[in-house]
Amino acid sequence: MNIIVTGGAGFIGANFVYYELEKHPEDRIICLDALTYAGNLETLEEAMKNPNFRFVKGDIADRDFVYNLFKEEHPDIVVNFAAESHVDRSIENPEIFLKTNIMGTQVLMDACRKYGIKRYHQVSTDEVYGDLPLDRPDLFFTEETPIHTSSPYSSSKAGADLLVLAYYRTFKLPVSITRCSNNYGPYHFPEKLIPLMISRALADEPLPVYGKGENVRDWLYVKDHCSAIDLVMRKGRVGEVYNVGGHNERTNLEVVKTILAQLGKPESLITYVTDRPGHDMRYAIDPTKIHTELGWLPETKFDDGIKATIEWYLENESWWKNILSGDYQNYFQKMYVDKGRA
Ligand code: NAD
Ligand code: TDX
């Protein structure tokens, strides 16, 4: 099968590219990515050596470009990771979130309609459900929980989800959606909580915890998210939403203290800073549906996953230091433009 993976130079998309190349060596992966600040081609260096992998630089919201790619590649499956993904950036500047996350999704689905497709899979988030109160640990997000967003980011993801379901109902486009909780693991961009805290702790810099650090996130190791998407896009029911999560709730403060303890750094690095506006209190996923229908279960416990993640950041210092210095943004120029490949 030919599979277009959009946003494959980002955190989860890149992990998914590697997951697919290993699990389904018979399939061909075409990665379409605009290489925004969050896209890093260095991450895909190993994949580039695989003859079943192709990288294409382009914007999912660029209709002509997307149609030409579909005409050329005849994809069987499209899985859409491409998005603006950082809540804080959406509070600074919402517009690009609407363009990429909503309009980009529409263009991809129009291409699917025009050229035919076996499955369009949308990678969504638990943030579309809003948040849960801290004093109701009995409550979880199910697929029936109403959409109730807090940030421009989550609103743009919810807008995209509604459009995907509308294309199923109106045009019978064979779609599916996964809504996952917070991911962590290798290649996580160091603007997000876990990699930010690891890189700053290693440099003995203050760790900015928003508010009181009591907000709860439900952490899932990225490989477990990849296995869930792989299952749903191949075997999940068309037109359905599947929640993905592994019951790994932690307060932000617990996560930061775990990182400090593993790195042997003092808790005095923790600095409480002004809270994020509209900050969601608690996310918690009920993954019963994907478990009972498709047999999915996460394999990595938080304690093991966070250890492996910290080790990965220690062993791959050049990867995140290139990001902090901005060097990674020259990679496409160096490897493609200068060599006459693009
Ligand atoms: P990321 O920011 O690390 O990567 C996004 C990728 O998309 C980058 O490579 C970027 O260059 C690319 N991109 C952005 N705009 C594009 C455009 N217009 N055209 C083509 N490519 C474009 O994001 P991530 O954390 O890997 O998240 C991937 C997806 O998973 C997103 O849709 C996000 O909403 C969703 N998600 C993320 C999490 C999480 O914890 N990180 C959890 C649940 C769902
Ligand atoms: O410096 C920080 N200090 C801090 O206290 C940062 C960057 C974050 N935080 C807090 C805010 C959140 O409560 O940590 C928590 C996690 O923050 P992020 O890493 O920004 O993730 P979150 O806002 O939970 O959103 C993530 O999970 C859902 C992803 O970025 C989204 O793309 C995904 O949809």
Image (cartoon, grey):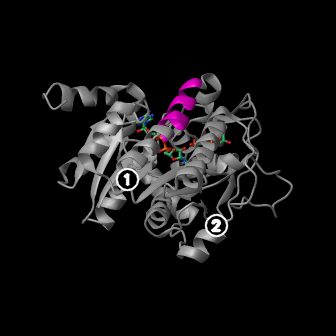
Residue sitting at the far left: 339
What is the number of callouts on the image? 2
Q: Residue at x 43, y 66 (%)?
A: 234
Residue 128, x across and y down, in percent: 67, 46
Q: Residue at x 70, y 35 (%)?
A: 210
Amino acid type at circle 2 is: Pro
Q: What mark, if any, has residue 116 been given in the picture? A: 1
Q: Mark yes or no: residue 191 visible.
A: no
Residue sitting at the far right: 135
Q: Earlier in the sequence, mark 1 or mark 2?
A: 1
- Mark 2: few/some/many CA within 10 Å (<14, 14-19, 20+): many
Q: Secondary structure at mark 1?
A: loop
Q: Is residue 203 above or below residue 213?
A: above
Q: Mark yes or no: residue 157 visible.
A: yes
Q: What mark, if any, has residue 302 been given in the picture? A: none
Q: Residue at x 44, y 45 (%)?
A: 11
Amino acid type at circle 1 is: Gly
Q: Residue at x 57, y 30 (%)?
A: 98
- Mark 1: few/some/many CA within 10 Å (<14, 14-19, 20+): some
State which region is magenta: 95-105
Cβ(mark 2) to ligand 1 < 8 Å?
Answer: no
Q: Is residue 294 above or below residue 194?
A: below
Eye-nearest disc, 1 or 2: 1
Which residue is disc 2 drawn over?
287
